[in-house]
Image: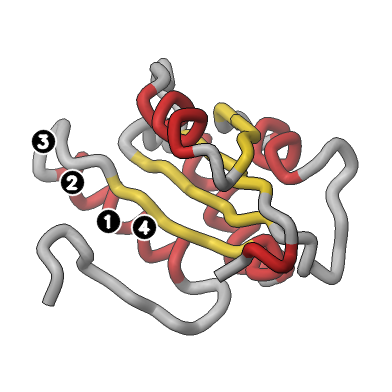
Amino acid sequence: RIPGVEVSSGSLGHGLPIAVGMALGLRARGLQTPRVIAMLGDAELDEGSNHEAIAYASRARLDRLTAIVVDNDSASHGWPGGIAARFEAEGWIGREVDGRDHDALEHALRASVEGRPLAVVAKVEPKHAA
């Protein structure tokens, strides 16, 4: 067990919906910390359960929720304007950064979210993907 890592789903489409539930649970308990972070791949966004979670999280104003999307151009479907724009269309704050630039990632993750969930899209070349 790794402290702070509560779920490792392994199945595409489960991580973000689970994170939404965790963020709701923390809010129900009156906790302002910790931040709930879900790591996704761009291809995982092809799963419908993620779109439901994206839509719900913004409407529920889950500002303790962060989605980090590793974008290595492996998705079957593209998004007009890119992945960050997809999240922004649902009311999230979207940021796109170079996935290999640790300073840019840290800056994006530390930025104020003002009552909305945060999506950080980490662009990487396919050969650099994990």
Q: Residues within 10 Å of mark 4 (few under 14, many from 20)?
A: many
Inspect the image, locate mark 3, and give the three-letter code of the amino acid beneath it: Gly
Q: At 47% from the left edge and 73% from the top edge, which residue is drawn?
A: 14
Q: Residues within 10 Å of mark 3 (few under 14, many from 20)?
A: few
Residues at discs 1 and 4 in contact (Cβ within 8 Å): yes
Q: Which sits earlier in the primary sequence, circle 4 or circle 3?
A: 4
Q: Quadrant of the C terminus?
A: bottom right
For numbered disc 3, what is the local secondary structure? loop
For numbered disc 4, what is the local secondary structure? helix
Q: At 46% from the left edge and 59% from the top edge, which residue is drawn?
A: 39
Location of residue 5 in the rendering, given as x and y in whole percent from the top left corner: 22, 64
Q: Which sits earlier in the primary sequence, circle 3 or circle 1?
A: 1
| 18 vs 98: above or below | below
| Residue placed under numbered mark 3 in the picture | 30
Inspect the image, locate mark 4, and give the three-letter code of the amino acid beneath it: Ala
| Residue placed under numbered mark 4 in the picture | 19
Q: CA distance from mark 2 to mark 1?
A: 6 Å
